[in-house]
Image (tube, helix red, strand yellow):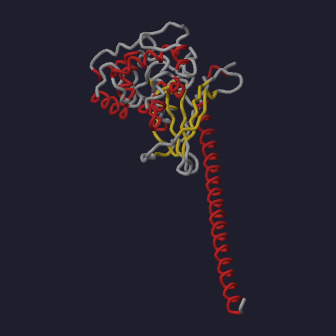
């Protein structure tokens, strides 16, 4: 090999080494950047989780120490409203509190209201009857087959889990009901989950129910719902007659499922932050006579956050401060 050829070979080899070094440097730079990004994201998620925990602790304290009224948690302008309005929590987190009496109870709602509700979510009329029948068959304890329902053998034939023959534990369990899980309109943006409950709360609270649930009331047209929402902004409803006056007709709801203007003992708390790809949701039941705690968590889960993010957010009101009444003087008389 001549000297010129040798120098050319060395130059080419050097260039190849530089190319390899450049590629390796770029690769490791990208990996380092990715690792830094993941670490920052993990730190943000951890911070958000801590802020959510602090906010949840504050809410649970209020639940255990504040009276439920027509206004919500507390009374008057400092009441915490229980209609899923969005409050600022600790840090940059947001929180919603929803009275479950303002939601449609999948376990106890009558067929007429459930039929209207499914229609509001976009389910065609020809499908609603069968969906109601399959839900009832899934929940009830007997093995009798409704006209358009489904029992264990129908589920097994489709390689589905057999019905539990008990009340739904969470709204998410409705996915397991034949004909419900394959209806995308129910599950897009958590629509069914946001508007329903499976707890023990009965009745409907016009002070906390969203428009879609109010629209299931007998005689509740779009105009009637708008009037109910407008009225409760001025002052909360205090009895069923006020709602009947707005609808223009008796509500004729089944026993135990009528209008009740006080929130139930079960509330749903939803928390999220702009830095996390998930939201946290818990359902809390008040247990004031329990020896262990004044509340219990019925269920907890992670859901997708609101899309788009809420724009109308407000600060959480100050805690309600109960001033002890002055003791009667006769208690101190000798």
Count of numbered tags: 0
Answer left or right for 115 relative to 300.
left
Question: Observer-nearest residue: 129 or 320?
Answer: 129
Quadrant the N terminus occupies: bottom right
Quadrant the C terminus occupies: top right
Question: Observer-nearest residue: 319 or 31?
Answer: 31
At a point 42% along the width and 48% down the height, the residue shown is 311
Q: Quadrant of residue 235?
A: top left
Question: Observer-nearest residue: 55 or 319?
Answer: 55
Q: Position of residue 288 (x, y in %)?
A: 63, 23
Q: Position of residue 66 (x, y in %)?
A: 57, 31
259 shown above or below 67: above
Q: Quadrant of residue 173?
A: top right
Answer left or right for 99 relative to 288.
left
Q: Position of residue 102 (x, y in %)?
A: 45, 26
4 shown above or below 113: below
At a point 53% along the width and 24% down the height, the residue shown is 176
Residue at far front of view: 1
Question: Observer-nearest residue: 6 or 177?
Answer: 6
Q: Position of residue 258 (x, y in %)?
A: 41, 16
């Amino acid at each position: 090999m001549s000297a010129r050829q040798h120098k050319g070979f060395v130059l080419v080899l050097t260039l190849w080494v530089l190319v390899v070094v450049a590629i390796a440097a770029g690769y490791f730079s990208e990996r380092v950047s990715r690792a830094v990004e993941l670490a920052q994201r993990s730190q943000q998620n951890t911070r958000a989780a801590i802020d959510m925990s602090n906010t949840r602790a504050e809410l649970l304290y209020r639940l255990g120490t504040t009276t439920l009224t027509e206004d919500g948690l507390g009374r008057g302008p400092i009441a915490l409203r229980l209609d899923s309005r969005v409050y600022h929590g600790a840090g940059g987190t947001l929180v919603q509190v929803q009275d479950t009496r303002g939601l449609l109870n999948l376990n106890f709602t009558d067929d007429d209201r459930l039929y209207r509700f499914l229609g509001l979510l976009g389910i065609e009329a020809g499908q609603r009857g069968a969906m109601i029948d399959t839900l009832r068959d899934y929940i009830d304890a007997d093995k009798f087959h409704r006209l358009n329902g489904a029992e264990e053998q129908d589920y097994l034939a489709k390689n589905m889990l057999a019905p539990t023959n008990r009340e739904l534990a969470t709204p998410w369990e409705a996915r397991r009901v034949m004909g419900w899980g394959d209806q995308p309109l129910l599950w897009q943006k958590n629509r069914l989950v946001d508007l329903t409950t499976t707890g023990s709360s009965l009745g409907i609270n016009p002070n906390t129910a969203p428009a879609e649930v109010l629209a299931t009331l007998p005689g509740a047209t779009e105009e009637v719902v708008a009037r109910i929402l407008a009225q409760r902004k001025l002052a909360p409803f205090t009895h069923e007659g006020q709602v009947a006056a707005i609808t223009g007709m008796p509500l004729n709801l089944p026993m135990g499922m009528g209008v009740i203007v006080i929130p139930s003992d079960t509330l749903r708390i939803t928390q999220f932050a702009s830095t996390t790809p998930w939201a946290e949701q818990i359902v809390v039941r008040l247990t004031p006579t329990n020896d262990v705690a004044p509340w219990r968590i019925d269920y907890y889960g992670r859901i997708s956050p609101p899309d788009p993010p809420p724009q109308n957010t407000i600060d959480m009101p100050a805690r309600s401060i109960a001033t002890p009444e002055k003791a009667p003087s006769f208690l101190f008389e000798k």
